[in-house]
Image: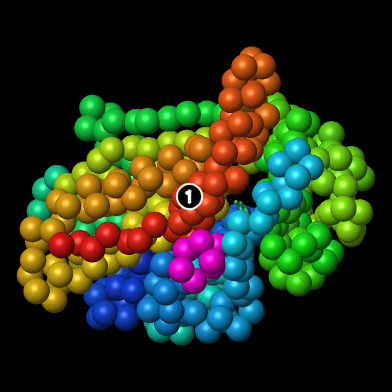
Amino acid sequence: MKTLKTQVAIIGAGPSGLLLGQLLHNAGIDTLIIERQTPDYVLGRIRAGVLEQGMVELLREAGVGQRMDAEGLVHGGFELALDGRRVHIDLQALTGGKTVMVYGQTEVTRDLMAARRETGGRTIYEARDVVPCGMKSDEAFVTFEKDGETWRVDCDYIAGCDGFHGVARQSIPADCLKVFERVYPFGWLGILADTPPIHDELVYARHERGFALCSMRSATRTRYYLQVPAEESVDDWSDERFWDELRNRLPEDLAQKLVTGPSIEKSIAPLRSFVVEPMQYGRMFLVGDAAHIVPPTGAKGLNLAASDVSTLFRILLKVYLEGRTDLLEKYSQICLRRVWKAERFSWWMTSMLHRFDEHDDFSQRISASELDYFVSSEAGQKTIAENYVGLPYEAIE
Ligand code: APR
Ligand code: PHB
C-alpha cells in the first residue's frame, strides 16, 4: 500500500470540497482532495445559480471572486407570479441594501478548479473505493484505489464534502445519526437554452397547473423549470411541449415575451428535504450536501454548503494557528442552526408555490391565502426577502 500525508483530507471535489480546500490552502494548511469522478464530469452537472452575499464574500476571501464579479449578474429583487398576478420582491429595499449574485454553480466550480491548479493544491480525480477510517481514534486516514493501486492518506481531520450519495455519511454507524427527511411527490424538469431571459429578474410562478421558474445564467442563457410528477420521464418532454407548458403557467404579459430555442440540457431533479444530525463523527466533518438537502425553491443548497465551509474553515484556523481544539465539537451545532432555518424557508417556499394534488380544497385555499397575506404585508415581504438574501453566518465563538 502506498501512503500519503496531509493535514485535512477532503473527500469530494464539488463546490464544498474545492472551496474548503482553497481557503485552507491560502492559510497554509495542507489539504488533499479525493474525488471519484473526472473534472469534466464534475463540471457537466448543471446545478443552481443564485449566490447569497455571504457566499459571494467567501469566494472573494478565497481569492476566486474575479470572474464572478466581472460576469455575474447582481440582482436586487425577484418576482412572484401568483396565478397571473405579478408581485415584485424588492430585496434591496426590504433588507437595507442586500442583493444576490446570479452566477452558475458550474462557473463557481470552474473558478475553484483553476485556482487549485494555479496554487498547486493536490487533487486526486477518479479515485475508487474511497473509505474514511479511524475517525474516532487519533489516527484518522482515508484509503482509496487509483489505477489498480491502493493508497492510504494519513491526516488530522477528514472533511466529508462528497454530496448526498457520498461515502462519508454512510461510514458513520447508523445509531450515531438521526435522519430527518421529507420527499415531495414531484420533481423539477429543467432546461438550459441559449435564449435571452424573459425578464431581468428571476420569476417564481405559482399556477394551478403547477410551479414554474424562469432563471438565467447570463444575458443570453436561460434556465427554466417546470414542476412535474415525480415519476415523469424526460423523454416525454419535447422542447416544444416544455415551452408550451411554461407559457401556460406564466402571466400573459410575460408569456408573450418568452423567446424559445433548442434546449442544450434537459433533466428532471427530485425534490427532497433532508438533514442528518450531528454533522460530525470524531475527526470527520460532514459539509454541504453530504449532511443536508433542500428543495431548490429557495436557492439555498449551494449557499448552505458555503456557510458550512466557512464555519469549518474558521474552526480549523483556530486549531492550526492557535492550538484551540475545543471549538471542533461546536461545528455541528453552529451549522445546524442555520441549516434548519434554510430548511424551513425552502420547505415553505416549496409548499407555497407548488401544486399538491393530494391536498384537499381547504388546504389549497389556506396556502393561497397564506402567500397572499405574506406578499400583501410589508412584514411578510421582509421575511421572504431576508431569508432569500441569506441569514447571517454565525460567529464560531
Ligand atoms: N468518493 C469520492 N468523491 C465522491 C464520492 C466518493 N465516494 N461520492 C461523491 N463524490 C463526489 C462527487 O462526485 C461530487 O463531485 O463528491 C462531490 C460532491 O459534490 P456536490 O454533490 O456538488 O456537493 P457539495 O460540494 O456539497 O455542493 C453543494 O449543494 O444543493 C447543492 O447544487 C448544490 O451541488 C451543490 C451542493
Ligand atoms: C437556477 O438558476 O438554476 C435556480 C435559480 C433559483 C432557484 C433554483 C434554481 O431557486
Q: Say above or below: 153 vs 30.
A: above
Quadrant of the rendered image containing residue 297: top right
Pick the front one: 135 or 87: 87
For label 1, the crowd category at 10 Å Cα-Cα, with few meaning under 14, some 14 to 19 and many 20 or more, is few
Magenta-drawn segment: 91-97
Q: Relative to residue 148, is residue 5 drawn left or right?
A: left
Q: Is residue 307 visible?
A: yes
Q: Is residue 104 magenta?
A: no
Could you tell me which quadrant the C terminus lies in?
Answer: bottom left
Q: Position of residue 121 (x, y in %)?
A: 38, 76
Q: Say above or below: 301 vs 374.
A: below
At 47% from the left edge and 79% from the top edge, which residue is drawn?
Answer: 64
Quadrant of the rendered image containing residue 34: bottom left
Pick the front one: 155 or 52: 52
As shown in the figure, which amino acid type bears the numbered disc 1? Answer: Ala
At 34% from the left edge and 57% from the top edge, which residue is drawn?
Answer: 308
Q: Is residue 95 magenta?
A: yes
Query: On the image, numbered disc 1 is attached to which residue?
Result: 379
Pick the front one: 66 or 137: 66
Q: Position of residue 244 (x, y in %)?
A: 90, 42
Pick the front one: 143 or 98: 98
At 7% from the left edge and 70% from the top edge, which residue is drawn?
Answer: 323
Q: Position of residue 338 (x, y in %)?
A: 34, 50
At 32% from the left edge and 61% from the top edge, which residue is drawn?
Answer: 393
**Total numbered circles:** 1
- Label 1 element class: helix
Q: Position of residue 299 (x, y in %)?
A: 55, 52
Could you tell me which quadrant the N terminus lies in?
Answer: bottom left
